[in-house]
Image (cartoon, helix red, strand yellow):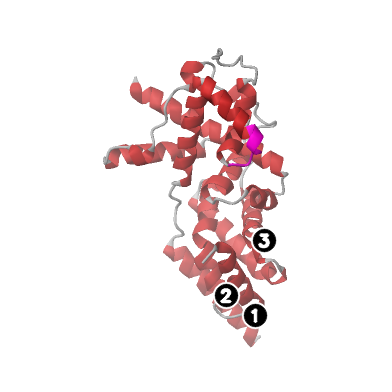
Amino acid sequence: MSHVDADSLLLDKIHKDEPDAFDRLVELYGDRIFAYGMRMCGHREDASDVFQDTLLQAFRSLKTLKEPKALRSWLYRVVSNSCLMKRRKGKFEPRRELSLEELMPAGAEQAAVEIPDLADLPVDALLRDEARRAVHDAIDSLPPSYREVLMLRDIEQLSTREAAQALGLPESTIKMRLHRGRVMVRNHLAAQVGTAAE
Amino acid sequence: MSHEHGKAAVGCKAIFERLSEYLDEELDPEVCAAMDRHMGDCAPCAKFLESLRRTVTALHDVESPRLPDELRRQVLEDYHRLRDDLKDG
């Protein structure tokens, strides 16, 4: 079943006030909402609050939502607003968009650093775990405004349009931040590879 | 004809800027074709693209933390209690 079909059935249950509607919402989106909160807030306690805030909002407002296609972006909008309330504006929040020149490899040598393909790594649990940890560290090191876009597009796999609706940003900004976020992750991994090779 | 990385007619910076859209197949076919031509001629850009592609694949495969069972149980219990209270009240 496609996610739109599943969302359509869920919204139908919510509109009819069926007893198991809320359970189905938790079943479909509980893990995702919690994971998004963990990545954006960094603490389990905050992620738990975000999760409960989001479900409370859903309980209050989802009955008024008509369009099943909008359900995912609506939920992520609530989650991202809840995370925004939680997170402190800190040193990692850039006051301007990062310029591409800052992220572009300085020369051919830096551009050519190879990122290992996790699927190609030898069947060595330690190596794979290390590579996975490096990816997680790279995501966590992103400024929040880039991390939230990368989370929605690459991990939750929303479309550019859905991510734009969820975050209330123009599609052009989503594309720009996604690209910068990916390049930052790539550079982080390349630096790890460089360190490991030394 | 090869060029020094960063100094191509279709500049490496212009290519660099659109690599994610290229990977996400969000570009017009003509733009993709121009980028393919550039990449065929510019090994650093081609290698960077490959490393970015692998990065995106790794991101797609990231395992997310799961909702703890205890929190799931608690929120469902709270909801059903609230629902029952509203019905009774």
Q: Is residue A92 visible?
A: no
How far, Cα to Cα, is label 3 from label 1?
A: 18 Å
Q: Quadrant of the C terminus of chain A?
A: top left
* Residue B29 figure quarter: top right
Going from N to C along the chain, the mark reached first, 3 or 1, is 1
Q: State the image quarter where residue A11 is shown.
A: bottom right
Residue kind at label 3, given as amino acid type? Ala
The local crowd at label 1, few if under 14, some if 14 to 19, many if 20 or more residues have their Cα within 10 Å, is few
Determine whether B37 is above or below A68 in the image.
above
Q: CA distance from mark 3 to mark 2?
A: 17 Å
Left or right: residue B4 compared with residue A137: right
**Relative side of A95 to B40, left or right:** right
Q: Nearer the viewer, mark 3 or mark 2?
A: 3
Q: Residue at x 61, y 50 (%)?
A: A159
Element class at badge 2? helix
- The circle on residue A70 is 3
Q: Residue furthest bottom?
A: B88
Residue A149 position in % (x across, y down): 61, 44
Instruction: Answer yes or no: are tags 1 and 2 on the same subunit.
Output: yes
Residue type, label 2: Ala
Whether marks 3 and 2 lie on the same chain: yes
Front in this rendered view, residue A96 or B77: A96
Residue B29 is one of the magenta-drawn residues? yes
- CB atoms of marks 1 and 2 within 8 Å: yes
Amino acid beneath label 1 = Lys
Residue underneath mark 1:
A16
Q: Which residues are magenta?
A: B25-31
Mark 2 lies on residue: A21
